[in-house]
Amino acid sequence: MKILISDPLHEKGIEIFKDEGFEVEVNTGLSPEELHQAIKGVSGLVIRSATTVDQALLEAADELKVVGRAGTGLDNVDIPAATEAGVVIMNTPGQNSNAAAELALGHIFALSRHIAKGHRGIMDGKWEKKQLRGREVKGKTLGIVGMGNIGAILAELGAGVKMKVIGFDPYLDDAEITERGAEPVSFEELLARADYISIHVPKTAETTSLFSAENLAKVKDGTFLINCARGGIVDEEALCGFLESGKLAGAALDVFEMEPLPADSRLLYADELTCTPHLGANTFEAQENVAVAVANQISKYLKGGEAEFAVNDPK
């Protein structure tokens, strides 16, 4: 059986497939037309965020049985279409959670102490010590939207630097949120109380534009907003407006509505904004973890029918 790896994957994952006796083709950066040709004869497809698994690709596939996402997010996969086509979709939850949580905490510190702005100033020959007075995070309230794996790790990290942690998750009850290290609150209460809001939910119909102009207007004056989840959860135009007005003290984005960020994006001109190019899972450790996990999961499914972390059931 043949495995196609259409996005970059750590070598350890490739080695597992080969050790299991699969024919492995690594072919990244393909156009949709090229991918439609490459998918012929493929039993297992390994993707990250660059490859789109849509109706057209599924129709082009003639032997595809499973798609494995080396990571968590599946907004680039048409899951209903895959289910209809009889293709199992699986991801690797938890394998890059620590990396994403650490990045969120890094952005909290970067915003609080003007690290990016201070660096840019020095590179421009400025010494803005007086202008860049910062804030300490100790004693501040960290509001986490989404108390899954990443949110729970961030709660632990936040408590470790002596922040008060509150959390909202509509899919968990109060006892579960408490167990994950946060005081359970409603979404409205989190907006009103948090000094820092960190987003850790998937992009769905319910979460798209969750942080709209209407909801951003409800946050406490001087709040910091961090999004290391998915682009489109935060309304970027509204965000820029609230940064310009001073309603938000600052924001950090690792993800965007369009990636790479367009050259005419208003975000490029927003003050008190720090950005990173979708680095949430981009650590050496996380890349190895997800590669090993996806290779093991696909191998188990193709050889024994065990669909670990499958998000659909096409049977």
Image (cartoon, grey):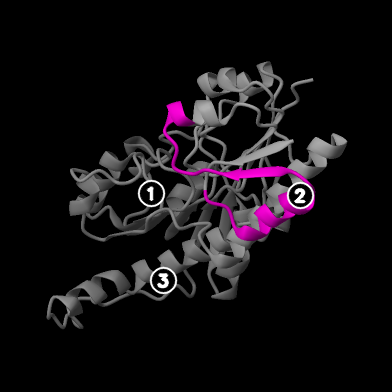
Is residue 176 visible in this depiction of the protein? Answer: no
Q: Nearer the viewer, residue 184 or 79?
A: 79
The label shown at residue 296 is 2
Q: CA distance from mark 3 to mark 2?
A: 36 Å
Q: Earlier in the sequence, mark 3 or mark 1?
A: 3
Amino acid type, label 3? Phe
Residue 28 lies in the magenta-colored region: yes
Closer-to-camera residue (236/33):
33
Q: Residues within 10 Å of mark 1 (few under 14, many from 20)?
A: many
Image x and y of residue 1, in percent: 74, 35
Pinpoint residue 132: horizontal percent, then vertical percent: 23, 76
Q: Nearer the viewer, residue 305 or 141?
A: 305
Q: Earlier in the sequence, mark 2 or mark 1?
A: 1
Residue 125 in the image: x percent, y percent? 12, 80
Cα separation between marks 3 and 1: 20 Å
Image-based side of 307 in relation to 9, left or right:
right
User: CA gap, disc 2 to disc 1?
Assistant: 43 Å
Q: Which residues are magenta?
A: 8-34
Tell me, for residue 219, which label it has, or none.
Answer: 1
